[in-house]
Amino acid sequence: MAILKVARLGNPVLRKKGRNLTKEDIHSAKIGRLIDDMIETMREYSGIGLAAPQVHESLQLAIIEFSQKSGRYPDMGKLPLTVLFNPKITVLGKKTQKYWEGCLSIPELRGLVERPSKIRVEYLDRQGKSQKVIAEGFLATVFQHELDHLQGTLYIDRVKDTTRLSFLDEYKRYWEPGKDEEEGELGD
Ligand code: NI
């Protein structure tokens, strides 16, 4: 296992669409090692998700893991370690929500992003089996943030109001959730 170098904003690999993986890829030793290294890297940097392009691999692969202690609100829920290959998102309903997001590829920055609040995600798991999950609230934002990476999209692209873009220290000083009920925090 190894801690991988995380690509930062400006690196073109973050802007490329990842390629789909075949069942052979999914069962290969190379991808198995990559997943183990991504897990170690995500945990090392206290991320709640990591996408393959963030570690210089242009693939449709992301991992997510978070527990309540990484969130500030009890209703943020938790998700055991989940490995997603070739994921597809379907938006369910018209409701949206706003969370402050951060990204390991954009250190020290937070931005308020509005996204659909309920989605369905279809993907292949680590064993190559088809899975389907319905996500709402904070978890829906986590999935969308990570899966955006696989399309070359970063959360800053989705910050509509750039007055809601802030360095971490200033975020804590002026924007920390609690002041506005509909604004939460995503600390990836
Ligand atoms: Ni990110």
Image (cartoon, helix red, strand yellow):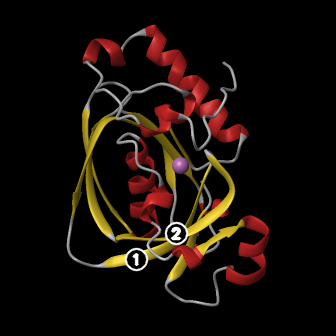
Neighbourhood count class around disc 1 (C-alpha, 10 Å): few under 14, some 14–19, many 20 upward:
some
Is disc 2 in contact with disc 1, using a CB cutoff of under 8 Å?
Answer: no
Residue 66 at what x, y percent from top left? 57, 53
Q: Residue 118 location in percent, x, y?
A: 30, 68
Question: x, y percentage for residue 156?
Answer: 50, 60
Q: Residue at x 41, y 49 (%)?
A: 153
Q: Nearer the viewer, mark 2 or mark 1?
A: 1
Q: Is mark 1 within 8 Å of ligand 1?
A: no
Task: Give the residue number, with chain letter if any, for mark 2.
Answer: 76
Secondary element under disc 2, as helix, strand or loop, is helix
Badge 1 marks a residue whose secondary structure is: strand
Q: Is residue 156 left or right of residue 69?
A: left
Position of 136 relative to 36 (above/below): below
Q: Amino acid at mark 1?
A: Gln
Question: Which residue corresponds to mark 1?
Answer: 97
Give the x, y percent position of residue 56: 53, 26
Look at the picture and state if 13 lies above or below 134.
above
Q: Which residue sits at x=34%, y=35%?
A: 17
Which image quarter holds the N terminus?
A: top right
- The vertical placement of 27 against 180, above or below, is above
Would you call the spot at circle 2 few (<14 residues within 10 Å), some (14-19), or many (20 or more)?
Answer: many
Residue 126 in the figure: left or right of residue 107: left
Q: Residue at x 39, y 27 (%)?
A: 59
| 60 horizontally vs 155: left or right | left
Residue 9 - label = none
